[in-house]
Image (cartoon, helix red, strand yellow):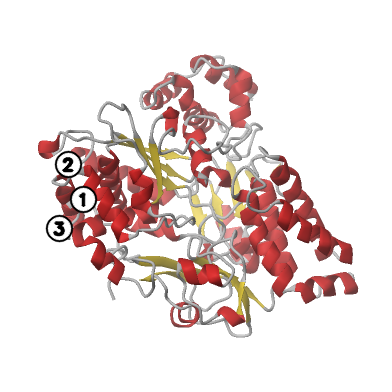
Amino acid sequence: MEKPLTQYINPNRPALHLKEYERVGGYSALRKALTMAPKDITNMVQEADLKGRGGAGFNTGMKWSFVPMDPDIGTKYLIANADEMEPGTFKDRLLMEGNPHQLIEGMIIAAYAIQANVSFIFLRWAYKKAARLLEQAIAEAYDAGYLGRPMGSTGYQLHLHLHTGVGRYICGEETALLNALEGKRATPRLKPPFPQISGLFGRPTIVNNVETLCNVPHIVNNGPDWFKALSNSGDAGTKLYGVSGRVKTPGIWELPLGTPMDQLLEDHAGGMQDGYRFRGALPGGASTDFLVTEHLKINLDYKSVASAGSRLGTGTMVVLDDRTCPVGFVHNLEHFFAQESCGWCSPCREGLPWTEKILRSIEDGRGTIQDLEILEQHTIQLGPGRTFCALAPGAMEPLQSALKYFREDFESHISQKKCPWR
Amino acid sequence: MHIDSILSEQEIAAIEKEVAKLPMPKAACIEALKIVQQHRGWVSDDSLQLIAQHLQMSTAELDSVATFYNLIFRKPVGRHVILLCDSISCYVMGYEKIYEGLQRQLQIGFGETSPDGRFTLLPNACLGTCDHAPALMIDQDTYPDLKPEQLEAILNTYP
């Protein structure tokens, strides 16, 4: 089984420095890319069907194809979204700490494909080790002439800057990220115009997730057919899957897209810890609907998870066990979302704190049966199409599925006037 | 309290390095806030005014940015800042026990600074250490797989 993204990542030894990365074939994809027309790289990535690994799952090559390619268009930007803050998600950390040059090479190829000359990595504040390693790797790439100087016969050159954030989950939303990079409050922007046309400082901009960009050199080296054959499903490539919660061996594994959920939980995460039973899981971070026991056989690809009523999201699973209160679990999630709402639109700013307070009162034994109706109304009023961005609809996903799958637990809190787990 | 009436040469040099990467000075304001906070521990009203003047923007506009981000401190903090992850994986793995332990050791709750000015304790959203939950950060250091009984020894390494 091929693991292109993690083949050179070994937690027991330091990340590859430039010379080591080159020795195992690093930057050969960039050299190949520079012999190709930018448009042909975009077409290749589009044909490979590389779906965005940040959660939305949009075809990456198609996203790039919306960037205007008029040679007189002026400054364009490429941004790596490394603001990994989805609760339960820790996959991009592994890629940046384990092989920072892979990300840099992917960024240079992506920037060349859209003919951007300036790029940024927007890294979350907490990833100190990743920041240090990326800084070193960027300096090495400048010294070696992969950055900051015209390359080969193309004359193409790219600048790359590392920006570390100062908190707030909403910075991971791509238009909020652009505002943060411009030195503004990170509220999302109205779309259209899409960033591909008018993004950072009003210039054409592509924002891609770290894992997405790390796939690019491998696609350029090996081609779309190879990339599609890596998968067990209709979705191409491998995926970094993670599991956290009360399993025996929590962690991250690179597996074919479409790996069955029970295989991930049993063969890789080692099954549940002794004395704990599986009750459900959020398959792709905090803003995805619960999957439960009846879903254990499904394949973890975009389409199959959607058919089961959830989203693959970031591919990092958080497990709910039988000794953790589902109401407390969902309250914790809604506390997070209420706190991280940017406050720009009313449904999110007002609705999420209300949701959190109701869940708190149910958890504390002060809930009424009417509260469940109010929560259900919120899942509709804060749903897709009713808010400015995807934060509140994402927040409603675990809530609406908890009300469906764990309804009797909500009801027992109300009838017993206390949390049965406390 | 340490209040400088001008930005130091070091602060200005670091800010200018960031300004050079961007099309307009005020786009560097988050970097500038970080730089000043790194030197002074937090961002006072005076510091805010100095940065705003330097970047040719209004103090009010800069404050609207500064107060949006939870890791820009607009109040004084202790010599060390503890960020305890209170998000979902750490919830499942028992961050509440760690919080209780910290409260016992330091006699402070979230949002407070110990009377000796040594520690400020803050909750923080997911630190991305979910496979080693519960976790916290003190200054630049991450502590994974925490148990309440380890807290005393860890805290003792921060004078």
Image mark count: 3
Spot occupied by residue A290 in the image (x, y as percentages of width and height): 62, 69
Q: Earlier in the sequence, mark 1 or mark 3?
A: 1
Circle 2 sits on which residue?
A144
Task: Specify whether residue A108 is in view.
Answer: yes
Q: Which mark is residue A23?
A: 3
Q: Around disc 3, counting alpha carbons within 10 Å, would you say few (fewer than 14), some (14 to 19), or many (20 or more)?
A: few
Spot occupied by residue A167 in the image (x, y as percentages of width and height): 55, 43
Q: Earlier in the sequence, mark 2 or mark 1?
A: 1
Q: Around disc 1, counting alpha carbons within 10 Å, would you say few (fewer than 14), some (14 to 19), or many (20 or more)?
A: many
Residue A123 shown left or right of residue A189 in the figure: left
Tell which subunit mark 1 falls on: A
Spot occupied by residue A352 in the image (x, y as percentages of width and height): 72, 50
In this picture, is B113 found above or below A264? above
Residue A290 shown left or right of residue A239 in the figure: right
Q: Mark 1 is on which residue type?
A: Leu
Q: Quadrant of residue B46?
A: top right
Q: Mark 3 is on which residue type?
A: Arg
Dot 1 lies on which element? helix
Q: What residue do we see at 60% from left, 22% from top?
A: B61
Tell which subunit mark 3 falls on: A
Dot 3 lies on which element? helix
Residue toward you, A151 or B18 = A151
Q: Which mark is residue A18?
A: 1
Dot 2 lies on which element? loop
Residue A166 shown left or right of residue A68 in the figure: right
